[in-house]
């Protein structure tokens, strides 16, 4: 039953898929763009007008299951838009009671705010109390999706007393620098964020329960898995179509038994990833901490490895065509392989899962 989605969710998926087809330009990903951002502000605003950014806010009535479906479509389209990250920020700002005006602007697409959260096991940004009830931030997060084009950043930090903190800072604040990162994935925008004495004003930061930061980290890990699922599903469709057209020895290669077996294995991997991702998204909606941790770890392990296998098999079944720069296959392969390393690797989440269930 974890695979089943409602009629309303099916309509949401179809709407988002059609919209992304019109607003995603893979030619730009192929091009040498230097440090120019792929995500266009006008596209982000248009997505926000559809209600995709503020989906998790109480007034909108959306769910993590809904947002995961949107992120899956982003992966299918290889879109650079950080809609999942922006949606989680809106929810986090509301829950922390931070900057309601910024949350409203973000939900409307007037500003782009992305979370700055370290990978599991890495050090949080250090926070110390500054003048006028402000907060001073020090630290560096090596990889932040969407940071190059962000207007503000929501930073997860830890105070001198060990308390978790969320702080909202402007991307052009004194002491904050963003270094555009060139990664294997060329379909999204990445940057390293360095905070050297950045000031968060009073009212722009709040001490939060550890569970708030943990839940945000789990939701981000789930979105990496959902994004990979969408990309893997697209590769499956592309590969099945290709082997039905490509001929060798006087017959289509899809007619060979070995090729059929590979395609069947790809389909099994995609469905395995889908059921774990959707189960994890529903666990986030229940508010059950134990179930959320287990389900997210399962999704990161199973979907991460399954989607990686799909990408490798797709490359092999496309033969020489799959290795060409002009073909879109490598864009999805790069995206999946990069996503496998974000939000905690499958190896990290497997160890975490063993700790949770042992």
Image (spheres, grey):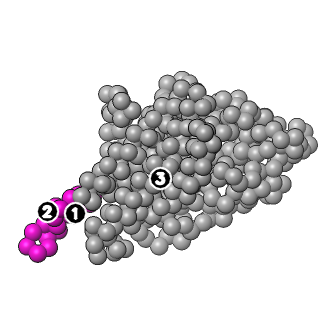
Label 1: element kind: helix
Residue extending farthest to the left is 250
Residue extending farthest to the front is 358
Could you tell me which quadrant the N terminus lies in?
A: top left
Q: As drawn, is 327 to the left or to the right of 81?
A: left
Q: As drawn, is 169 to the left or to the right of 89?
A: right
Q: Which residue is mark 3?
A: 304
Q: CA distance from mark 2 to mark 3?
A: 29 Å
Q: Which residue is mark 1?
A: 259
Label 3: element kind: helix
Sequence order check, earlier mark of 2 and 3: 2
Q: Which image quadrant is residue 4 in? A: top left
Q: Are marks 2 and 3 in contact (CB under 8 Å)?
A: no
In this view, the residue in front, 178 or 288, is: 288
Q: Are marks 1 and 2 in contact (CB under 8 Å)?
A: yes
Task: Check residue 340 for magenta coloring.
Answer: no
Which SS type dominates the magenta stretch? helix
**Residue at left offset 35%, top offset 49%:** 270
- In this rendering, the answer to whether 51 lies above or below 304 is above
Q: CA distance from mark 1 to mark 2?
A: 7 Å
Q: As drawn, is 119 to the left or to the right of 221?
A: right
| Residues rendered magenta in the picture | 237-260
Q: Which residue is mark 2?
A: 255
Label 2: element kind: helix
């Amino acid at each position: 039953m974890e695979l089943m989605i409602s009629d309303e969710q099916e309509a949401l998926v179809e709407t988002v898929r059609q919209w992304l087809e019109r607003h995603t330009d893979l030619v730009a990903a192929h091009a040498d763009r230097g440090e120019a951002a792929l995500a266009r502000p006008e596209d982000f605003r248009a997505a926000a007008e559809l209600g995709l950014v503020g989906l998790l806010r109480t007034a909108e009535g959306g769910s993590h299951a809904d947002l995961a479906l949107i992120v899956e479509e982003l992966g299918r389209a290889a879109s650079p838009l950080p809609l999942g990250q922006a949606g989680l920020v809106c929810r986090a700002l509301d829950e922390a009671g931070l900057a309601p005006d910024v949350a409203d602007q973000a939900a409307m697409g007037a500003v782009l705010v992305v979370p700055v959260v370290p990978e599991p096991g890495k050090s949080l940004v250090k926070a110390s109390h500054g003048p006028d009830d402000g907060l001073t931030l020090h630290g560096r997060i090596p990889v932040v999706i969407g940071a190059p084009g962000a207007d503000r950043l929501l930073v997860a930090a830890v105070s001198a007393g060990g308390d978790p903190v969320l702080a909202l800072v402007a991307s052009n604040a004194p002491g904050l620098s963003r270094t555009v990162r060139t990664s294997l994935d060329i379909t999204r925008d990445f940057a390293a964020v360095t905070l050297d004495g950045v000031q968060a004003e009073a009212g722009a930061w709040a001490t939060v329960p550890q569970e708030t930061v943990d839940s945000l980290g789990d939701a981000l890990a789930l979105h990496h898995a959902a994004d990979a699922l969408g990309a893997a599903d697209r590769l499956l469709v592309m590969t099945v179509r290709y082997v039905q057209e490509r001929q060798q020895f006087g017959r289509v290669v899809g007619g060979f038994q070995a090729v059929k077996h590979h395609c069947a294995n790809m389909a099994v991997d995609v469905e395995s990833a889908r059921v774990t991702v959707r189960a994890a998204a529903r666990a986030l909606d229940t508010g059950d901490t134990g179930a959320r941790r287990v389900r997210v770890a399962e999704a990161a392990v199973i979907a991460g490895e399954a989607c990686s296998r799909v990408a490798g098999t797709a490359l092999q079944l496309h033969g020489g065509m799959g290795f060409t720069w002009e073909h879109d296959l490598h864009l999805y392969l790069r995206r999946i392989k990069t996503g496998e390393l974000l939000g905690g690797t499958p190896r990290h989440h497997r160890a975490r899962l063993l700790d949770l269930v042992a």
